[in-house]
Image (cartoon, rainbow, N blue to C red):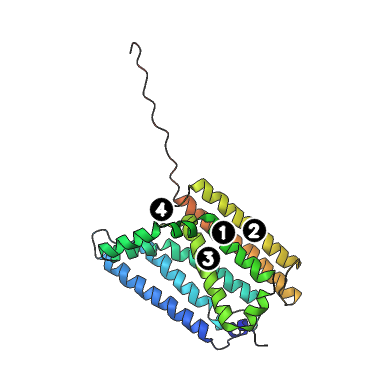
Amino acid sequence: MTYAHAGHAGGAVLDVASVGALTLASTLAVTYAWAALARRREPRGWSGRRAASFLAGCLLLGVALLPALSPYPPGDFRWHMAQHLLIGMVAPLLLVLGAPVTLLLRTLPRHQGRAVGRVLRSRPARLVANPATALTLNVGGLALLYFTPFYEVVEAHTAVHALVHLHFVAAGYLFAWVIAGPDPAPHRPSVPVRLVVLGAAVAFHALISQLLYAGIGVQVPVGEAERRGAGELMYYGGDLAELLLALALLSTWRPRRAPARTPVVAGT
């Protein structure tokens, strides 16, 4: 059996799916940079910090798919975990902080921008952008991959492996956008609600990483050293990514001020 991850490590040649992903990341970076430069020439300008964040996210996606940068041998489960941390948690957060939808709305003609706004306010968007949906897609994907025979299917079929990568990026982006994204989200709940959801995500990730380390219920056919190393990477790397997400969320929090009381004047 040829493992899909074997083509991602130890200096192996890039497979077709990785070349496609790299091409997509490069296209996104070039398109965003072109639109950001165009907006910077306008009076309102465009934030260099946002542009740097988005381009760093694209770069990180590319780096995660370069086999020559892997510190592990071909097919090592620890590289699989490091790769998924980068493309499923860190890179999506950087992309979200770049506010690409806001840039798109400022770039499109007015009537097309209104169409995007209607999509964001639609019922399907409300369902997808619900924090519970984002959490389920994020954590549920991990549980399906590591605690069912699905991992062996993913490793045996490059196309399925590419779809799993796509799911990690999309679910990670959705979760980061729902929790802390600067882009418009008409149905986004309050900050305290989002903090509760983020806390649940931290707890689920910690549980899954501990189960991986201990080998309880895990259906990933790898050696103990690889499995434990992957569990440690998921535990510490996931904590770091979720801490960054929490900081991004709290930086947007503007608690409402209580209305000022009207002083009571004697005799009135």
Q: Is residue 87 visible?
A: no
- Tag 4 residue: 186
Q: Earlier in the sequence, mark 4 or mark 2?
A: 4
Question: Residue 262: percent from the left, percent from the top?
Answer: 36, 24
Q: CA distance from mark 4 to mark 3?
A: 19 Å
Q: Earlier in the sequence, mark 1 or mark 4?
A: 1
Question: Residue 123: percent from the left, percent from the top?
Answer: 44, 57
Please report contact status of discs 4 and 3: CB closer than 8 Å, yes or no: no
Q: Residue at x 56, y 82 (%)?
A: 159
- Tag 2 residue: 204
Dot label at residue 171: 3
Callout 3 amino acid? Ala
- Tag 1 residue: 135
Q: Is residue 4 visible?
A: yes
- SS class, disc 2: helix
Q: Earlier in the sequence, mark 4 or mark 3?
A: 3
Q: Residue at x 62, y 84 (%)?
A: 6
